[in-house]
Each structure stands twice: as structure tokens, then as C-alpha cells.
Image: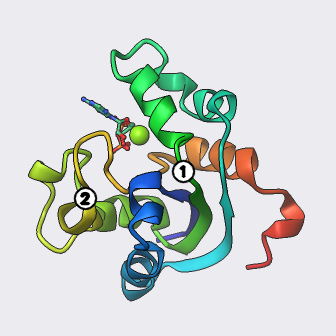
Amino acid sequence: MAIERTLSIIKPDATKRNLTGKINAKFEDAGLRIVAQKRIHLSPAQAGQFYVVHKDRPFYGELVEFMASEPVVVQVLEGENAIAKNREVMGATNPAQADAGTIRKEFALSVGENSVHGSDAPETAKEEIAFFFSGLELVG
Ligand code: ADP
Ligand code: MG
């Protein structure tokens, strides 16, 4: 198994409820290292650009508005098989379908306000990390 990096976002519903530390503990307990992290407030244009892959989905407008509604914490997680491992720790998109113990099962409010984002493949992880972080910010 290779050491990978993946892009994670703690979404507005979670930052608003002061859950950043509890969510980070889930990542660290699963062996993922937080190698870069910052709290930012996305503009609607930035949120729209990040989620442009979903622009034709019916929930796009709602998703962009939500992601720009409050600060988010963007972070790079590193570890063995980090992309798949992070998706496992996050749980299913819809919290009603998420496994017990996952972040979304424990914290998500709905399929839209589901507390975390995680990259879904090596290519998207690379693009999404570069969207938020410069090489100088990735200290390992
Ligand atoms: P994931 O975040 O698990 O990779 P997707 O990439 O399919 O899920 O969707 C991106 C985000 O869009 C979801 O995390 C969620 O915030 C939102 N979303 C997905 N499906 C819906 C839906 N049916 N209604 C509202 N929001 C949704
Ligand atoms: Mg996705």
C-alpha cells in the first residue's frame, strides 16, 4: 500500500457546531496525519469552482450556498491508502446510510449538510490539494 495524500474539508455545519477537534480526532485515530490545515471562508465563486464537477446536479446551487455560508477547515490528510481510508472514516454521503462510528453517522445533519468532504481518487486528490495549498504549505 502506498502513502497517499487526500484533500479533506470540515464543512460549515460542523465548524459552526464547534466539531473541528472531534472530527480531527477521528482522522488521527484512523492513522491519518493532518499535514496541512487552515480555516477559511469561501466566497460563493470559490465554492462554485471547487464543486464545478456537480454544476448540472439539481443540488448544486444549494451546495454552493451552504459551502460559502460559514468558515470551513481545509486540510491535507496523509497516510497509507489515505484516499480510501478517509472515505471510510467519513461514511456514506447520506448519513442515514452511513456505518456506525463514521463521521457522517455521528455528526452530519442531512445529505447536504454532511460535515465533511474527501477526495474520491488520486487525480482529484492532487487537483483539490493544489486548489487550496501551495507546495510551501505542505510540510509533511
Ligand atoms: P461525497 O461528498 O460523498 O463525495 P458527492 O460527491 O456525490 O458526495 O456530492 C458532493 C456533496 O454534494 C455531498 O457531500 C453533499 O454535501 C452534496 N449532495 C450530494 N447529494 C445531495 C443531495 N441529493 N441533496 C443535497 N445535497 C447533496
Ligand atoms: Mg464527491
Tell me the residue at 18%/74% (across/down): 101
- Residue 46 coordinates in the image, percent (x, y): 68, 34
Q: Residue 91 carries which label?
A: 2
Task: Look at the picture and state if 116 lies above or below 21.
Answer: above
Q: Quadrant of ligand 2?
A: top left
Determine whether the beta carbon of the residue marked 1 sits less than 8 angstroms from the nearest atom of ligand 1.
no
Q: In this view, does 91 lie above or below 37?
A: above
**Most distant residue in the top direction:** 56
Q: Residue 70 carries which label?
A: 1
Type of amino acid under label 1: Glu
Name the one closer to the observer, 115 or 97.
Answer: 115
Residue at screen point 59% across, 27% down:
48
> Residue 85, how many percent across, how many down?
37, 67
x 32%, y 62%: residue: 90
Q: Could you say which is closer to the camera, residue 116 or residue 72? A: 72
Q: Quadrant of residue 116?
A: bottom left
Q: How much space separates mark 2 and mark 1, taking CA atoms?
A: 23 Å
In the image: residue 43, left or right of residue 109: right
